Image (cartoon, rainbow, N blue to C red):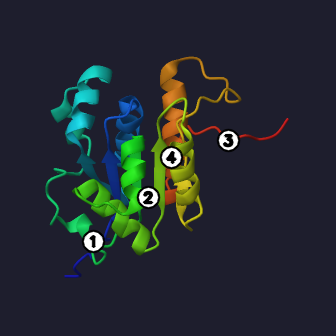
Amino acid sequence: MIKKISKEKKRLIIGATGASGIPVLQKCLELIKEEEDYESWLVLTKSGELTCQQESKLSVEEIKKLADYCLEPEEIGAKPASGSFKTCGMLVVPCSMKTVAGIHSGYADNLLLRAADVTLKEQRPLVLAARETPMSAIHLRNLYDLSMIPGVHIIPPMLTFYQKPENIDEMVYHIAAKLLEPFGIEAKEYKRWNGL
């Protein structure tokens, strides 16, 4: 009898902070779940949990169940805290300016910030769905500095209209698809710009 060797899934760390944008987080987790070659490792901060209660129809526990694995920010010794834990990168969605500042300065005092720090030092893709408006000079400086690091993608969840969205759900889907693209995930309904 030939034993079938199971293929190891690509691990994607998802950080979620207290900034506005929980529906985008939810859609990203749903899209990852559709990909049989990927698994999600969610780190949801306490501020993120408060924003979940404000912005989502799902409970915090329901959102956590969308991830394959869910870790607490206090679990500083968890697997994503080490570079020897192989991942395909990290997405922070939504990403607060406090988190941007922490990543920028290397202030890794919780698992989310430590996982981002590891992602940078291992030169893996790091996508930040930076959420704030208007942005101060400090926000812009921090984001600019991070954007100069190879592999860092600053992708604010901005609305686009070229795909002719008919509702908010379609807009959220489009943004989530753009956030996942740097990790090799191609969302089925993602509408690319095809020129005029």
The single residue placed furthest to the bottom in the displayed view is 1
The answer for how far apart the CA atoms under marks 2 and 1 are is 38 Å
- Closer to the N terminus: mark 3 or mark 2? 2
Q: Residue at x 24, y 67 (%)?
A: 81
**Secondary element at tag 4:** helix
Residue 104, numbered label: 2
Residue receiving disc 3? 192
**Secondary element at tag 2:** helix
The amino acid pointed to by label 2 is His
Q: Residue at x 42, y 49 (%)?
A: 100
- Disc 4 or disc 2, which is closer to the eye? 2
The answer for how far apart the CA atoms under marks 3 and 2 are is 31 Å
Q: Is residue 24 visible?
A: yes
The answer for how far apart the CA atoms under marks 4 and 3 are is 13 Å
Q: Residue at x 71, y 29 (%)?
A: 162
Q: Mark 4 and mark 1 in contact (Cβ < 8 Å)?
A: no
**Secondary element at tag 3:** loop
- Disc 3 or disc 1, which is closer to the eye? 3
- Closer to the N terminus: mark 2 or mark 1? 1
Residue receiving disc 4? 179
- Closer to the N terminus: mark 4 or mark 3? 4
List x then y, in percent, for residue 48: 27, 36
Residue receiving disc 1? 6
Q: Is residue 181 visible?
A: no
List x then y, in percent, for residue 63: 24, 35
The amino acid pointed to by label 4 is Leu
